[in-house]
Image: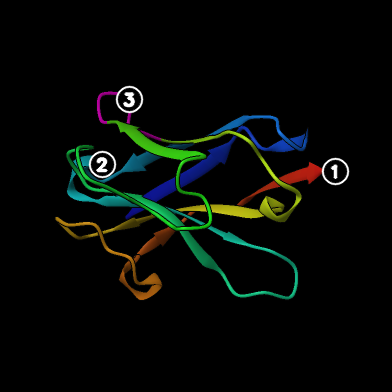
Amino acid sequence: QVQLVESGGGLVQAGGSLRLSCAASGRSFTRYAMGWFRQAPGKERDLVGVVDWTGSNTYAASSVKGRFTISRDNAKNTLYLQMNSLKPEDTALYYCAAARDLGVPTRIGAYDYWGQGIQVTVSS
């Protein structure tokens, strides 16, 4: 079992930055690939980015590539999402998730554990 708790969300103006954190507890953090997802009202939950267990390999969705950076600190059992140049369309509930996978899984079904989500709102 892995428990995930997101923090760092809030309200920011377009063009601004936020950094989300996801603190993990429970089974060994390094056994899991970690991902960030987001869900806007009335829409499906979409993948934002993934980082493998080493932290060396990442994937970013095309909608955020070049603006968002996913990373992890295995010594601190923490996942990060640095979000720059935020746009109103980035407004959503953001979730971190853990997958028992040695690669960079992009399917939502690959993820076994989820945080409760944290709101990010970008005003125009």
- Residue at the image point whose x is 72% and y is 52% from the top: 91
Please name the amino acid that badge 3 sits on: Lys
Q: Which picture quadrant has residue 108? A: bottom left
Q: CA distance from mark 1 to mark 2?
A: 37 Å
Please name the amino acid that badge 1 sits on: Ser
- Residue at the image point whose x is 66% and y is 55% from the top: 93
Circle number at residue 2? none
Instruction: Tell me the residue that label 2 is attached to.
Output: 29
- Residue at the image point whose x is 51% and y is 42% from the top: 5
Q: Nearer the viewer, mark 1 or mark 3?
A: 1
Residue 100, above or below 82: below
Q: Is residue 13 left or right of residue 110?
A: right
Q: Is residue 28 magenta?
A: no
Binning the other alpha carbons within 10 Å of mark 1 as few (below 14), some (14 to 19) or many (20 upward) gives: few
Q: CA distance from mark 2 to mark 3?
A: 9 Å
The answer to whether residue 98 is visible is yes
Q: CA distance from mark 1 to mark 3?
A: 35 Å
Coordinates of residue 88 in the picture (x, y in percent): 76, 50
Q: Which picture quadrant has residue 80? A: top left
Instruction: Tell me the residue that label 3 is attached to.
Output: 76
Query: Nearer the N terminus, badge 1 or badge 3?
Result: 3
Binning the other alpha carbons within 10 Å of mark 2 as few (below 14), some (14 to 19) or many (20 upward) gives: many
Query: Nearer the N terminus, badge 1 or badge 2?
Result: 2
Q: Report the span colored magenta.
A: 74-79
Q: Which picture quadrant has residue 15? A: top right
Q: Nearer the viewer, residue 96 or 116?
A: 96
Coordinates of residue 33 in the picture (x, y in percent): 26, 52
Binning the other alpha carbons within 10 Å of mark 3 as few (below 14), some (14 to 19) or many (20 upward) gives: few
Instruction: Tell me the residue that label 1 is attached to.
Output: 124
Q: How many marks?
A: 3
Residue 34, above or below 42: above
